[in-house]
Amino acid sequence: MLTKRIIPCLDVHQGRVVKGVNFLNLKDAGDPTVLADFYDKEGADELVFLDITASSDGRDIMIDVVKNVSENVFIPFTVGGGIRSIKDIRLLLQAGADKVSLNTSVILEPKLISQSSRIFGSQCIVVAIDYKKITDFKESKQDKGIGIDLDSKWEVYTHGGRNRTGIDALKWAERVSDLGCGELLLTSMDMDGKQQGYDIEYISSVNEKVNVPLIASGGAGNLEHLYTVLEHGHADAALVASIFHFGKYKIADAKEFLIQKGISIRV
C-alpha cells in the first residue's frame, strides 16, 4: 500500500503567502521561504507553491522564490502559476522545483502536457484542475469530448477561478491523464477556504476514471476531513492550508490522528 501524503499549500500573491475563501478576501499568512522551512522541519511530506494571480495578471514565473526555497528546504515541492511553455518548466526545474503544476496553459494548449512529460518525465508534471459545481448550465463551445452537457456536474475554471471554460471537470481529468500527466491536483472552488470538508463526490468520481495519483484540495477544516478524503475520497494526498498556516493544528497532530485511524502515512 502506498503511503498517503500531507502537503501544505502555499498560495503566493505579490511575494507573500495568502489564504482566502473561494479565492477571495486574501489574508496574509507569511513569507514563503520562512513558511517552507517551517513546514520542512514540521514533517510535511511535500509542499505546493501556487502563484494564484500569475495567469490572470500575465506575470512571469516566480524563479526567485523557487531558488530561495530550494536552498533551504529538503522535501519535494511543486510550483504552479504563470507557467506557459517548455522554457518556463525547464527554468523552474533548474531553479530547484521537483514538479510543476500546469493549469490555464494546458487548457489553451493541451499538447504541452504530452510534450513536457516526454521531455522531463511524467513524474514532474502535475495538472491542476480548479472547478465548481454547475448551478447554471450554459451550452459549451468546447468539443464534445470535454465540453459540459446536461449530464455534467462540475465545470473547470481558469485564471485563479475567474473564468468559466465550458469544460466538464470530470472529462478533463480523463483527458489530461490520457495526455500523460503524472498527478492531478483537484481544487474545489466551492469549498476552498470554508473549512467544511473536501468535495468527496468529485474526487472519488475522478478516482474511478483515472490511474494517476490525486491530490485533494479545498476545504480542510479539521483532522476528520483529512481522514475522509484519504479513505473515502480515495485521494493519494491531502493539500492543506488554513488549519496549518494559522496554527489550528500541527502536521504531527494530523499524522498521529491518521495513523490511529489506520491510514498508511509517512512519519
Image (tube, rainbow, N blue to C red):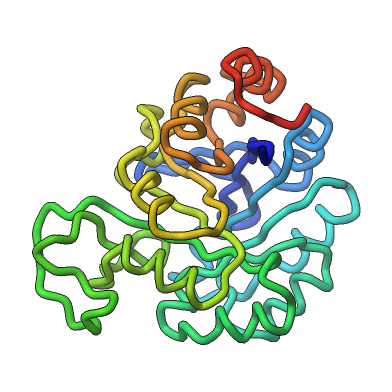
Quadrant of the rendering where the N terminus is positioned = top right
Give the percent coordinates (x, y) of residue 130. Answer: 39, 58
Total count of labels: 0
Q: Is residue 48 above or below residue 37?
A: below
The front one of 13 and 197 is: 197
Q: Residue furthest front?
A: 1
Residue at image point 56% right, 74% down: 180
Give the percent coordinates (x, y) of residue 217. Answer: 47, 44
Give the percent coordinates (x, y) of residue 261. Answer: 57, 16
Residue at image point 57% right, 53% down: 213
Q: Is residue 165 above or below residue 11?
A: below
Q: Is residue 248 above or below residue 15?
A: above
Give the percent coordinates (x, y) of residue 26. Answer: 45, 43
Residue at image point 51% right, 25% down: 227
In this rendering, would 231 be left or right of 115? left
Quadrant of the rendering where the C terminus is positioned = top right
In this rendering, would 153 be left or right of 185? left
Q: Residue furthest right?
A: 71
Q: Quadrant of residue 258?
A: top right
Q: Is residue 239 above or below residue 71?
A: above
The front one of 235 and 32 is: 235
